[in-house]
Structure formats: C-alpha cells, structure tokens
Amino acid sequence: MADMTMTEKILAGHSDREAIRPGDIVVTKVDTVVPLDMNFYDSMWAEPSKVFDPDRIVVIFDHVVPAPNRGVGEALERGRAFAKKMGISRLHDVGPDQGICHQLIADVPYAMPGEMLVCVDSHTCSGGALNCAARGIGAPELIYVMAKGFTWFQVGETVRYELSGSLRSHVTAKDLFLHLADRYGAHVGQNMEFGGSALPGLTMDQRRTLTTMCAEVSAEFAMFEPDEVLERHLRERGRSMDGGVLPDPDAVYAEVRSIELASVEPMVGLPGSVVHNTVGVSSAAGTPINRAFIGSCANGTVADLREAAAVLTGRRVSPEVTLFITPGSQAIYQQAVHEGIIATLADAGAVVTVSSCGMCAGFQNSLGPTDVCIASSTRNFAGRMGHPDAQIYLGSSGTVAASAVAGAIADVREFA
C-alpha cells in the first residue's frame, strides 16, 4: 500500500485491496456496529434473523431517554429483547453505564485505531479522534451490517489539516472548528485528516470535539493521527494502539491546509449553518438570548462542565435566561458530582439534565418560535432544537456560560 491517506489505508485493508483511490467503490468488513434506541422504533426496525458476531455489536440507548412516552418505552424494550436473543452483552441501558453514544465510543472505548465502526448517527465521524474509520450510515443499512458484517463506501478525496502552535487561553476546539468551517466551508464527499506539530497539546476531548463537528461541514470520515496522547488514553483503559495507521509519506491529498492555532479567537456560529457563517465573538456580542445549552456529543465532557463552572462560580444565570446542561454520560455526571462541579452549576441557576441527545435534537426542552438560544451543541439549522422560527447560535461551553450570565452573547474572556 502506497500513496494513501489514513482513511484510504483503513478502507483498503478492510476490503482486502492493496490500494484504493478516490472514486473507487469498496466493500469493507466492519469491526464494530452500534445500533441506538431509535433503531428499535416501529418505523425503523426490521429484526434480522441472525447477527454476524454478537461480540462486535454495541447497543446504546441515548437519543430519547429515559423513555418519555409509551412508544419509546416499547422501543427500548424491543432493543433489550433483541440484545438478549442475539447474545449481545454490550448494552448501555438507562443507568450508570448510559451516555451519548459517541462519548461512550471514545471513553470505553469501542472505536479503536485502524478499525472500522459504523452507527446510524451522523456524528459517528467522532470516532476518528481515536484513529478509527467511523461513519454514520442509514438505519436499513445498519440492520444489514448487523446481519452480514460488511458494508460499502465510495472513496472520497482527503483534505489534510496541518495544525501548529497552541490554542490561546479560553479558546477551544469548538472555536477552532467554527474558524475552519467559516474559512474553508463545506467538505461534501471529502475526508478530513488532522496532523501536525500541535497534536501533543490537544487532548482527546478536544480532538473528539473537532472530529464530531466535521459532520457539520458534510465530511465523510474525519481522522487524527495516532500518537502518545491516544496511546495514553488507550493504555489507561487496558487497550493498545497496535492497529494505529499513519498516512503514507507521499499520500495524495485534494489539498493540504495549515492552521496556526494561536490565530484562532473565540467564535460564534450564526443561525442556520456553520458553513461560511461564523464570526468572532465580538461581532455577535450583545445579541439578546433567553435560552442556553451546554452538552451534546461534541461538548458534554468533564472539561466542558469545568469550563462552564469556572465562569459560573460566584455568578448567577440571568433571570431572562434558562441554562440547560447535559453531561455526555452518567460517568461524566458522577465525576462532576465528586468534583463539586454540579453544585456550582446548580447554585448558579443552571438546570442539569440526564445524559442524552435531548435538547440538541429537540427531543427535550424544545425551543419555541421566539426563543433565541446559544448552544455548545452540534447543529443550528432551522428547526433542529424545536420550532423552525427559533434562532440558534453556536459557541464554546465557556461562551455559552458567559452569555447565560450576561443575558446576551458575551466574550468568555471578559468573565475569566
């Protein structure tokens, strides 16, 4: 195998080909399949008569949990029965092991270097932070993959990002993504690859924020190089980086782009889309809000909760604003409890909810037609979090916390 990017090398290896090129269609073996609670809804479920390997399937309930109505309750029951029938032992039901799927995929972990993982959720590219080729697929295709153990992809071109320097204080990976989305726009049909001298300074949480958000510029796969940071993350969980994949030295890219991290400032995504539609926070500052949300698969980490708590310590959420905070998993919630973070958030007037996709996808705490919300979640298109007339801005968790206190979009650096 030569001249290939990381994504191309994993796809080639899983399709028993020596080399592949953009435009090729490949049939690939799958290492891990992740069905979610929504897969078991009446409208989406068709039970396979068998599964290719129960030890390679992970069932995670995360989108609409705990069950708010009879229909969802029946879907969860159907999922439990399926896991039991097929001998699937890895079931993350409502309880202490529950969480948003991409958080669990990274934290357990289920995404592994050099492997292929599929899930029905569009943000599955999140797993690329662990050097895993991870991608969302359709619900019918997921059922097929559970039965057969393989799927197909058309190989896209890859854009490589060379990251250098380090992020300044109070500038986050969310700001980096919003900067990237505005400067370079959509990546439809393309893969995104991250490397460069800045990698040792980027945590796994920061990397996963970046790869998760790559879905918002329509990337197919998003991938970080394997390094000491990933190796330590895996070692702490009893896993190894043996399958790690680096790009070939002469890999062919559609484009190689350089970003100096110190040039990035706190950013805000304007309503509708992040593609060529973000600004520095100073340009949006002062915009009144009445809703704020910290959480989602992109920004529900302990680091995000600490970031919010640092802003909210000794302060109160504006009486004009409701601030919702959703930890990415119950394990993160428990850690935040032990660190005293949850008490700080609650004392400031925030509402802490159960770990789920919840508000990010409009399943809980939906926005009304006149609501204006700033969120550290994933998406801000019309209707994403409720009514299509609601306005949704995106920012880092620190920016959201600062805005919740101010009652208007605010620069987190002024609250440091």
Image: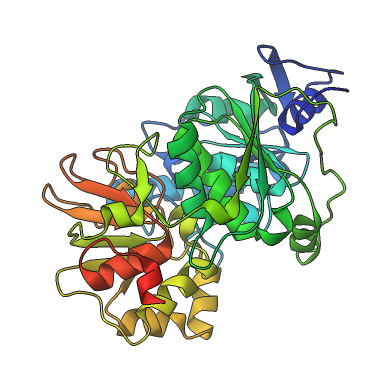
Q: Is 320 left, or right, of 17 in this rendering?
A: left
Image quadrant containing the C terminus: bottom left
Question: How far across and down, in percent of the image, does residue 260 sit?
Answer: 61, 49
Question: How far across and down, in percent of the image, does residue 180 sit?
Answer: 50, 41
What colouring does the structure picture have? Answer: rainbow
Instruction: Please state which of residues 270 and 95 is positioned toward the viewer in this rendering.
Output: 270
Residue 36 in sight in this render: no
- Give the residue displayed 50% in from the left and 46% down from the top: 177
- Give the residue displayed 60% in from the left and 44% down from the top: 259
Residue 345 in sight in this render: yes
Question: How far across and down, in percent of the image, does residue 242 sit?
Answer: 87, 48
Q: Hey, which residue is sitting farthest left in the picture?
A: 370
Q: Is residue 270 above or below residue 97?
A: above
Instruction: Please state which of residues 157 and 353 is positioned toward the viewer in this rendering.
Output: 157
**Image quadrant in which you'd find residue 288:** bottom left
Instruction: Please state which of residues 203 and 336 is positioned toward the viewer in this rendering.
Output: 203
- Give the residue displayed 33% in from the left and 69% down from the top: 402
**Image quadrant in which you'd find residue 158:** top right
- Give the residue displayed 28% in from the left and 66% down from the top: 403
